[in-house]
Image (cartoon, rainbow, N blue to C red):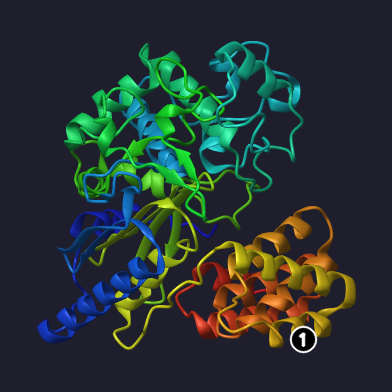
Amino acid sequence: MGYLTVLLALLMLDGARANAHALPGPEREGTVESVRAYLDTLEHAGISGTVLVEFQGSLVISQGYGYSDLLQRRKNSPRTVFDIGSVTKQFTAAAIMKLEMEGRLSTEDRLGRHFENVPPDKAGITIHHLLRHSSGLRSNIGSDYDSITVAAFVDSVLKSQLRFPCGTDFSYSNIGYSLLGIIIEKVSGMPYEAYLYRSLWQPAGMEQTGYRRPNFDATLIATGYHYDDEVWGKPTEKGWDVDGPFWHLKGNGGILSTTEDLFKWDHALATDRILSDSAKAKMYHPTLGEGENRNSYYGYGWDIHKTRRNTMLYWHNGSNGIFYADFFRFVDEGATVMVLTNKSNGIEDVGREIARALFDSSYRPVVPVLDNEPNRTLTDHAILVTLQEGIEAGGKELQGRKPGGNLLEQRVNRRGYELLNSGNAREAISVFRLNVLAFPTSANAYDSLGEAYMVAGDSALAVENYRKSLALDPGNGNTEKMLKLLLGK
């Protein structure tokens, strides 16, 4: 992961919220107005959600777009409550750090301290491994809303097969964070949500964050919609237990919140009101054990990156395929970007586009292509032709598409990763090449193609495509890291 070891620098970064890259007044206002115009364009294109932007230490945008309830024509607002998905993980991680501050556990605790009958292959897993997704545990053992008891959940996790020995690799694990939630309950003697409220949310002034405890006004909870506006419903209407989701989801996702509350959390983390400076330094940049995989950027509940401006970005997103959340914290530049949506039809890159526009006044953020039925049909057909007949045939399909028809970049990317993760690297390369052909200015398309070539063992083409990606998006720390890895630097 390349984590820094000098804690003093981290504390200065997190506490100062300095404006080292401040723009002159007129240029700053022009940048903000450009972002506002971009968001207005997105609303006309069918985006539905709430956006909050802090820039150079000032709250410049806090506004809803589209509808939280189409039938009632109820608009989204900064008070609208959304499912924030895996952004939940930062709260679980912070609660663990709080319990360690209280002397009630240690991140070096092994599973055996908190669970009985831990099998030998999992005996070495520590809380640290769970927090960093380096435990080797798989991602899920059931669906979000499946009913399951604590005992049955723990038993199923302990019986599951590890993907690799703990500490030797990175693999995103939702069930690892649910285990952390259960540990929080065992150690605190309180329900998961109750402990988070007492120790994190109440001190931060967050009264609209949680599962059941806030007793939300139902009219403020956003209704989720599929891409075609078919009703998915509210998270609270799904298969929950009396105190919130079952353990397939609790602790790793599904917390409800607002941009207003998350902004309070953002600012609380810039103080020692909830977590000490040393606890935050450890959360963002944990010390890695000997031989532990260092290629992941994951700390405890956060992705950690250094920008091209030599500043720190703490980031996480979350999604259940309907709701989507993005949370960017440029901690030493006084900038925060949040995007919460109840219809994730192409919004996945909006937060990153906003952030890029904030720090590059000449950049014009890209309006995403809508994920609708005609575009999905076109995309799936182009992928099929590419896989069956080759990239040239796929390219001809793109050239012959009707006016207004668009390939869906994220849908192509997802299909490529499905193939890559199932061991079909060559087929994945064909699909990713289709994306590059359709989106020649997309840094992400080249990044994915570079990764596929790397998995296939073609280092030269991996380097070539990672370089193209970095040229298009110089701020992508992950691409830069992979290039250094491939070039042995």
> Quick one: label 1, few (<14), some, or many (20+) residues within 10 Å?
few
- Compared across the picture, whether 366 is left or right of 463 comes to left
Does residue 6 show up? Answer: yes
x and y percent of residue 399 in the render?
A: 70, 88
Up-down relation of residue 85 to residue 384 (above or below): above
Which image quarter holds the C terminus? Answer: bottom right
x and y percent of residue 269 in the render?
A: 25, 46
Which residue is at the front of the view, 52 or 114?
52
Does residue 301 show up? Answer: no
* Residue drawn where x is 43% and y is 75% of the image: 367
- Compared across the picture, whether 352 is left or right of 330 comes to right
x and y percent of residue 458 in the render?
A: 81, 75
Q: Which residue is mark 1?
A: 396
Which residue is at the front of the view, 162 or 384?
384
Up-down relation of residue 287 to residue 190 (above or below): below
Which image quarter holds the N terminus? Answer: bottom right
- Compared across the picture, whether 103 is left or right of 447 comes to left
* Residue drawn where x is 59% and y is 55% of the image: 294
Up-down relation of residue 287 to residue 152 (above or below): below
Up-down relation of residue 467 to residue 285 (above or below): below
Identify the secondary structure beneath mark 1: helix
* Residue drawn where x is 18% and y is 69% of the image: 56
Dot 1 amino acid type: Lys
Q: Quadrant of residue 470?
A: bottom right
Which residue is at the front of the view, 356 or 78?
78
- Compared across the picture, whether 442 is left or right of 53 comes to right
Q: Residue furthest front?
A: 71
x and y percent of residue 486 in the render?
A: 69, 73
How many callouts does the rendering have? 1
